[in-house]
Amino acid sequence: MKQLIVLAFSSCLIATAAAAAEPAGSFSRVIFADDFSSNAFGPRWTHYKSGSVVKDGILVGITPVGSDHSAVDIVRFPAERDLEVAVKFRFVSDKAKSFNVWFDDRDFKGSHAGHICNVNVSPTAVNIGDAKTGNFRNDIYAKKKATPSTLTAEDKAMLATKNSKLTVQLALQEWHALVIRTQGDSLEVSLDGKVAGSFKSEGIAHDHKTIVSLTTNPVDVHYDDFSIKGTGAAVANP
């Protein structure tokens, strides 16, 4: 029994030392990864109004014909604040308008669908949004959905501060590497190894993110080498 206690204590010390030695803001802890080599979705994937498939080692994003919502392919995990999401992607045809990487909290009731923040990528732009305190905040979302919209001039001025647009040029059929990092209230986007831009807004700092998803708008986006990482080292269980 004493030996087991010593071993458990030693394991905790090693994990603690590893975490202390890791540079601040380093994303080394793998929460989820999928290279789609199994040619099927693994058990941790869930889906909402999605016709997406895994074929020939890639995720093919497909919104079913006639659907009232873009295809959403989802990974859930225990709550995190700071995250790194990496994915390779390509737009296969001009039917591929864009895709979103969403960060959500399924337990949060202050925004539509628990949306926290997102990055939307199209062939010509990258848009970063604070959804929690911006477009998807419950009262704002309700005003936007009203017919006609009941957004005030003050609402529109506020919303202009909750989004950032970066201009890019992404050719069809070419693979690109996207990396998104949230750290506190900041979200940074890198494309093909270079920082494309960053954005700061209070909602991004939400400390209980439990979902990352890919939303395909509407079809013909291919994905590969998808991963979600957290900061710090996982502490070994006794």
Image: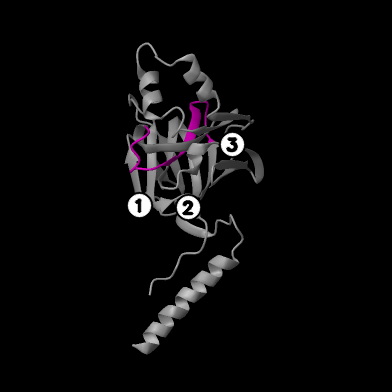
Q: Kindly identify the amino acid type of the residue bearing the numbered disc 3.
A: Phe
> Mark 3, mark 1: which one is toward the viewer?
3
Q: Kindly identify the amino acid type of the residue bearing the numbered disc 2.
A: Asp
Q: Is residue 55 rendered to the left or right of residue 185?
A: left
Task: Identify the image quadrant of residue 50.
Answer: top left
Q: Kindly identify the amino acid type of the residue bearing the numbered disc 1.
A: Arg
> Mark 2, mark 3: which one is toward the viewer?
3
Q: Is residue 75 rendered to the left or right of residue 175?
A: left
Mark 2 touches mark 3? (CB < 8 Å)? no
The residue that label 3 is drawn on is: 199
Q: Which mark is residue 209?
A: none
Q: Which segment did they paint magenta?
A: 91-111
Of the numbered discs 1 and 2, the one sitting upstream in the chain is 2
Look at the numbered disc 2 and give the secondary structure of its residue.
loop
Give residue 116's position: percent from left, percent from top. Answer: 44, 38
The residue that label 2 is drawn on is: 35
Pick the quarter of the image with the N terminus: bottom left
Question: What residue do we see at 49% from left, 75% from top?
Answer: 13
Of the numbered discs 2 and 3, the one sitting upstream in the chain is 2
Distance CA(mark 3)–CA(mark 1): 30 Å
The residue that label 1 is drawn on is: 44
Q: Is residue 99 above or below residue 158?
A: below
Give residue 132's position: percent from left, percent from top. Answer: 44, 34
Mark 3 touches mark 1? (CB < 8 Å)? no
Res 40 seen here = no
